[in-house]
Image (cartoon, helix red, strand yellow):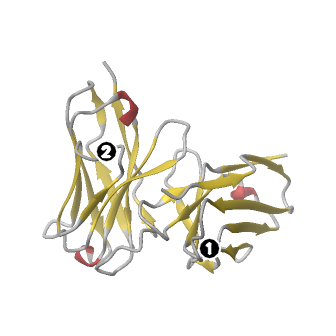
Amino acid sequence: QVQLVESGGGVVQPGRSLRLSCVGSGFTFSNFGMHWVRQAPGKGLEWVAVIWSDGNHKYYADSVKDRFTILRDNSKNTLYLQMDSLRVEDTAVYYCARDRPTLVPDLWFDYWGQGTLVTVSS
Amino acid sequence: DIQMTQSPSTLSASVGDRVTITCRASQSISSWLAWYQQKPGKAPNLLIYKASSLESGVPSRFSGSGSGTEFTLTISGLQPDDFASYYCQQYNRSPPTFGGGTKVEIK
């Protein structure tokens, strides 16, 4: 069965960095576009970033552009989110989510991980 | 960015009720709309894609309709397991955007 397992969350001070990971199993990871979606405490869902299945194209929400980097290692079935210059407003549960098995992502999500909490606080 | 507006934000209903949630897009998104269910402390779960296509394994009491700018999610015969939050999401144009959510509560 499809599984996505995130890790790497924690408490970090404003301005510092953190790297999240998401390991996929139960499917051919290299065939799927992958996303990060976040949810601030008590709030709704916000898309963060997408990476194509081959890793050659990446797109970001304006709120994280130039601070966050989405990466993948298809040999390790792993998706990453490198988060730099973190702000208090980045506090959220971060989910990785799977797109469709196409080179160009469809931008909707059929499987989600359980999420990892990132708290940015001094 | 395309703005998605859901109504109501909270809905009180009883087991067995027929429930309808509305989602409106700020511009036409054709049928490129998905619906998700989220329970407290859990990840969202895909219910509907392409406005009306039921995801595999999702009970048939869930249905979606609409196109253009107005969409609905209907639960026909609310079950205890359905008390949760529901989100619509457009994928017509990047960035993908979500509605603010509808919380379905026990009456």
Towards the viewer: A101 or B106: A101
As helix, strand or loop, the secondary structure at mark 1 comes to loop
Instruction: Answer left or right for A90 relative to B59.
Output: left
Q: Chain of mark 1?
A: B
Mark 2 surroundings: few (<14), some (14-19) or many (≥20) residues within 10 A: some
Between circles 1 and 2, the one closer to the viewer is: 2
Outermost top residue: A122
Outermost left residue: A75
Q: Residue B6: x percent and y percent?
A: 68, 54
Q: Is residue B38 above or below residue A55?
A: above
Which amino acid, by three-letter code, is at mark 2? Val
Residue B78 in which image quadrant: bottom right
Q: Is residue A104 above or below residue A40?
A: below
Towards the viewer: A19 or A15: A15
Residue located 62% across and 73% down the image: B58
As helix, strand or loop, the secondary structure at mark 2 comes to loop
The residue to which callout 1 is attached is B58
Checking the image for residue A85, the label placed there is: none
Q: How many marks?
A: 2
Residue located 56% across and 79% down the image: B56
The residue to which callout 2 is attached is A64
Q: Are marks 1 and 2 in contact (CB under 8 Å)?
A: no
Residue located 31% across and 52% down the image: A6
Instruction: Answer left or right for A57 relative to A32.
Output: left
